[in-house]
Image (cartoon, grey):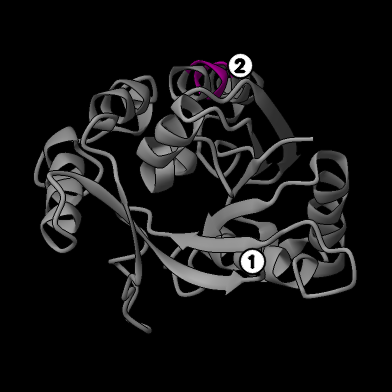
Amino acid sequence: MVDVLIIAAHPDDEILGCGGTMARLSQEGMSIATVFLADGESSRDDSANMDKLIEERKLSARKACQIVGCHLVDFIDFPDNRLDSIALLDVIKKVEYFLDLYSPSKVFTHYKDDLNIDHRIVNNAVVTACRPQKDLCVKELMFFEVPSSTEYSLSETFSPNYFVDISTTIDLKIHAINIYQSEMRDFPHPRSVKAINSLASWRGSSSGFEYAESFIIGRLLY
């Protein structure tokens, strides 16, 4: 049983979306688990080294999660950027399995209108698995933004209504995201350290903090 479950499409989404919040909640004594639905690598061209790349990505995920205080990490290994090739029911059942396993009260996952197809499907699966039922463990369902996916979409704009002060944990977020060196880019790409810092600064300015991460409330049940 854990307090918080992060359900992400790919390794690095968890830190980009809520790494500072993970670190803060961990420091406040909450236990955290993270589940990755897709492998994050298999859509790429270098198929000869694919198994090695996937294992390296998993190692990076474990290291990054440990930095922000998450010590339970699970991988489903659905194909990268091909979750639309998997029956949605199968994705939902995987999510339900981990909800039953960990019984979290808080769940963080992707926004429904991200550009990345895997992000959208994970959102759909999580919302379905977290539908209100008797004895549902999940009391808070939050949607995070992922730089280079959320803002790239031309659909509904991400308009956050929940902010977490990460002024004391922004350094841990940056340390953790730098573990994913193969995913990082040079500024002005949104997945650069400068841009990630800038987004946290902007979300902080929007909410009266030095640095913040922002979310859209999916559902609060109390």
Q: Secondary structure at mark 1?
A: helix
Determine if the magenta segment contains residue 64: no
Q: Quickly name the residue at label 1.
A: 121
- The reply, left or right, for residue 35 in relation to residue 188 is right
Q: Residues within 10 Å of mark 2 (few under 14, many from 20)?
A: few
Residue at (48, 70) in percent of width and height: 217
Location of residue 141 in the rendering, given as x and y in whole percent from the top left corner: 59, 63
- The reply, left or right, for residue 151 in relation to residue 204 is right
The magenta span reads 59-63
Q: Amino acid at mark 1?
A: Ile
* Magenta stretch secondary structure, dominant: helix
In this orientation, does residue 189 appear? no
44 or 184: nearer the viewer: 184
Location of residue 7 in the rendering, given as x and y in whole percent from the top left corner: 63, 48
- Looking at the image, the residue that sits furthest to the bottom is 156
134 shown above or below 137: below
Marks 2 and 1, the one that precedes in the sequence: 2
126 shown above or below 67: below
Residue at (18, 44) in percent of width and height: 211
- Quadrant in which the N terminus is drawn: top right
In this orientation, does residue 44 appear? yes
Q: Quickly name the residue at label 2.
A: 52
